[in-house]
């Protein structure tokens, strides 16, 4: 099978992965309503295209936080890439390099941050969970900065882990020899064995800091010079407060539908966040992006770029680095075509009047 679109990679991943690992990537919280809404909300939007525009030369190139990228699609932070292919995050960052994009590495990666950055030809950002042990968090931030990451992406929608029932049924665990590599040096690299439900939920329960607040953005800014993006926001007032505490960017995100079920689809709240922030920080969005037309809709509603997570994992599972490269190339081809058909030769031409 030669997939024609990224959704067909999901079928290949389902065939080739162990069911527990596939469910870990695919699942959402509880009834998975938000998981489905993230995608279907894009389908409800319409593109009112322009005609008689010279689109003989189209370019999806743009920049985020001043960094040039060849297309407005970033690799979202997702955990445990070695569940999808043996090379794990190294395959992913090579694919991002081929695409000329950038990768956001998860705290929960199976590959140390130093190795991923060393392998990359493009900027790497780091998604950060704040642990109750602030010294462990401080040490990790120092490592991230020393490794050469260009930004921190602070996840704020997980004071506790959402109820992911597929993981509970499967008693999800990492296979032997697979670790949370970035936390091994702090003695926090293993999921607890023998847990009744999800091993990840058992890992996070005593470690994640439920007291996380806006003052912790201030604390992070005091210990690093890296720009900080705040990921997990669906409300305009939260976005404004994050910016007032120094956030350089906002990622409109509901954690891929994996935290609070019946939370709104991210594309449905994007515009109000953009309007509230009013240019004081860059706005990115994740959740449900599956087509080039989805990217156009997100940019039309004010996002600087989109983050893509599950499709990259499907590509890895289907064909390793080559599969992830193919996923990004399909997105590029679809985006190029959608821009041309919308009468938008550049990303700057994708404006609010396109989307209704």
Image (cartoon, rainbow, N blue to C red):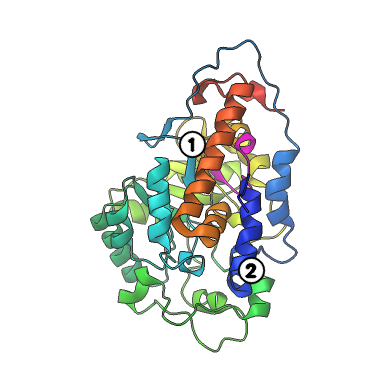
Q: Nearer the viewer, residue 101 or 129?
A: 101
- Residue 134 is left or right of residue 106, and the answer is left
Q: Quadrant of residue 51?
A: top right
Q: What is the quadrant of the C terminus in the image? A: top right
- Is residue 289 inside the magenta stretch? yes
Highlighted range, magenta: 285-294
Which of 298/330 is in front? 330
| Residue 240 image offset from top left, x and y in percent | 52, 41
Neighbourhood count class around disc 1 (C-alpha, 10 Å): few under 14, some 14–19, many 20 upward: many
At x 49%, y 84%, the residue is 192
Asked if the magenta segment contains residue 188, the reply would be no
State which quadrant residue 173 falls in: bottom right
User: Which percent across, then down, holds residue 318?
Assistant: 55, 59
Residue tagged 1: 72
Residue 150 in picture, x, y percent from top left:
32, 47
Q: Which residue is mark 2?
A: 23
């Amino acid at each position: 099978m030669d997939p024609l679109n990224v959704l067909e990679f999901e079928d290949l991943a389902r065939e080739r992965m162990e069911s527990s690992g596939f469910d870990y990537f695919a699942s959402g919280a509880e009834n998975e309503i938000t998981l489905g809404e993230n995608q279907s909300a894009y389908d409800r939007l319409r593109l009112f295209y322009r005609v008689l525009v010279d689109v003989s030369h189209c370019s999806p190139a743009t920049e985020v936080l001043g960094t040039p990228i060849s297309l407005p699609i970033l690799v979202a932070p997702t955990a445990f890439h070695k569940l999808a292919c043996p090379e794990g995050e190294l395959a992913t960052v090579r694919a991002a390099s081929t695409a000329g994009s950038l990768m956001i590495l998860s705290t929960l990666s199976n590959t140390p941050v130093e190795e991923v950055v060393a392998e990359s030809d493009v900027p790497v950002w780091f998604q950060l969970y704040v642990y109750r042990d602030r010294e462990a968090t401080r040490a990790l931030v120092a490592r991230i900065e020393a490794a050469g990451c260009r930004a921190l992406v602070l996840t704020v929608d997980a004071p506790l882990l959402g109820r992911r029932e597929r993981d509970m049924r499967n008693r999800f665990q990492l296979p032997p020899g697979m670790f949370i590599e970035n936390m091994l040096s702090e003695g926090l690299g293993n999921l607890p064995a023998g847990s009744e439900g999800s091993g990840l939920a058992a890992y996070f329960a005593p470690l994640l800091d439920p007291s996380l607040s806006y003052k912790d953005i201030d604390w992070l800014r005091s210990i690093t010079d890296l720009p900080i993006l705040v990921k997990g926001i669906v409300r305009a007032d939260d976005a404004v407060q994050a910016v007032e505490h120094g956030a350089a960017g906002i990622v409109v995100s509901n954690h891929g539908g994996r935290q609070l079920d019946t939370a709104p689809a991210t594309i449905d709240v994007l515009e109000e966040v953009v309007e509230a922030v009013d240019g004081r920080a860059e706005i990115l969005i994740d959740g449900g992006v599956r087509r080039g037309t989805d990217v156009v809709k997100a940019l039309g509603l004010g996002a600087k770029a989109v983050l893509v997570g599950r499709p990259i994992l499907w590509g890895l599972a289907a064909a390793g680095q080559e599969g992830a490269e193919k996923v990004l190339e399909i997105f590029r081809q679809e985006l190029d075509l959608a821009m041309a058909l919308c009468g938008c030769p550049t990303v700057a031409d994708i404006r609010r009047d396109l989307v209704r």
